[in-house]
């Protein structure tokens, strides 16, 4: 009886240790923060089955100009990995991240990228696949116990992006060369990939209202190019848009590169890209 009780005692200890290790492993999933919705969606796909990343900025907040709330600063401080494009896009993050230990920041563009360079890199499916690969590598280093899961998720995600690319090529092919105007130059990666014909931008800087001279130039561009649509963005309310289109029969559409109103999910990137393609085709197909 004494021998059996001793065995039972060791069995209980062993079970407690196993439960403790399991709980510890579960609690040790990496804390990942993505700056914007598209990056969050890709990170969520890579982390599926392991954990869920946090989203720093909602889609209706411009990443070009924002002030960190105390709760957002605490979120960043506690993160194991912060995924962002770079100081050319989320400029307010640059100074904050300089004070964090090395290895906690996954910057997707070179430091000090030239102003005027289009940093909306996720709108190019090839670059989106590169982002997925970077996430897989960084998360596998951070959390080697789940490296196989990250690699498998990344492979599936990149195949889905390849399939999506073919789908959008078919959808957008009828609109090759159809002229239009955008609010600001956020779409060149998408446009080059799918053969779209941007003929001008309302403003070179989305945070600044264009002047009278630029408005006149936009009117001339619309007349000369025969642009079928002019696209606004939900993050900005340019009061000059009405002045630009006055007297013309150009259609007003909307493009959203950031996912306003979309629920964060592993499918978020695909919803965003399909919505963008539909916004293009919906306006450009109008007579």
Image: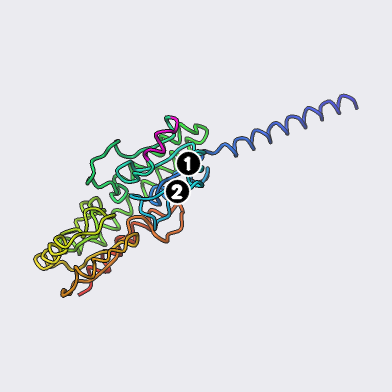
Q: Quadrant of residue 6?
A: top right
Query: How far across and how far down the image is residue 68, in percent?
Result: 44, 47
Please state which of residues 149 and 112 is positioned toward the viewer in this rendering: 112
Q: Specify which label sits upstream in the sequence, 1 or 2.
A: 2
Q: Magenta residues? A: 94-101
Residue ID at (17%, 61%):
176
Query: How far across and how far down the image is residue 1, in percent?
Result: 91, 27
Quadrant for the C terminus, please: bottom left
Query: Disc 1 vs disc 2: Cβ atoms closer than 8 Å?
Result: yes
- From the image, tell me which residue sits under label 2: 56
- From the image, tell me which residue sits under label 1: 76
Residue ID at (49%, 36%):
80
Q: Is residue 19 above or below residue 89?
A: above
Task: Label the magenta part by its dominant secondary structure.
Answer: helix
Residue ID at (39%, 34%):
98
Q: Is residue 164 above or below residue 231?
A: above
Rendered image: mark on residue 259: none
Q: Tell whether 207 sits left or right of 15.
A: left
Residue at the outermost front position? 212
- Crowd rating for badge 2 (residues with CA inside 10 Å; few <14, some 14–19, many 20+): many
Residue at the outermost left position? 224
Q: Secondary structure at mark 1?
A: helix
Please state which of residues 282 and 109 is positioned toward the viewer in this rendering: 109
Q: Tell whether 100 sits left or right of 250.
A: right
Q: Quadrant of residue 19?
A: top right
Q: Is residue 254 above or below residue 67?
A: below
Query: How far across and how far down the image is residue 219, in percent?
Result: 14, 66
């Amino acid at each position: 009886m004494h021998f059996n009780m001793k065995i039972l005692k060791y069995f209980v200890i062993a079970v407690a240790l196993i439960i403790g290790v399991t709980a510890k492993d579960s609690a040790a999933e990496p804390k990942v923060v993505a700056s914007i919705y598209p990056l969050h969606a890709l990170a969520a796909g890579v982390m599926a089955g392991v954990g869920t990343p946090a989203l720093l900025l909602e889609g209706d907040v411009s990443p070009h100009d924002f002030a960190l709330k105390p709760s957002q600063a605490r979120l960043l401080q506690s993160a194991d990995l912060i995924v962002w494009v770079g100081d050319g896009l989320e400029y307010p993050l640059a100074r904050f991240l300089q004070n964090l230990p090395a290895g906690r920041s996954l910057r997707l563009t070179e430091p000090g990228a030239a102003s005027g360079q289009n940093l909306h890199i996720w709108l190019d499916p090839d670059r989106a696949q590169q982002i997925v690969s970077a996430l897989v590598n960084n998360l596998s280093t951070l959390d080697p116990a789940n490296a196989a899961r990250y690699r498998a998720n990344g492979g599936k995600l990149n195949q889905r992006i390849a399939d999506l690319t073919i789908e959008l090529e078919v959808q957008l092919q009828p609109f090759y060369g159809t002229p239009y105007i955008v609010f600001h130059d956020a779409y060149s990666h998408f446009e080059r990939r799918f053969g779209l014909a941007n003929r001008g931008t309302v403003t070179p800087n989305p945070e600044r209202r264009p002047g009278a001279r630029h408005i006149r130039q936009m009117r001339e561009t619309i007349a000369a190019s025969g642009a079928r649509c002019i696209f606004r963005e939900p993050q900005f309310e340019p009061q000059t848009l009405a002045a630009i289109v006055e007297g013309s029969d150009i259609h007003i559409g909307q493009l959203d590169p950031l996912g306003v109103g979309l629920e964060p999910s592993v499918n978020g990137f695909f919803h965003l890209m399909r919505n963008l393609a539909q916004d293009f085709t919906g306006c450009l197909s109008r007579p």
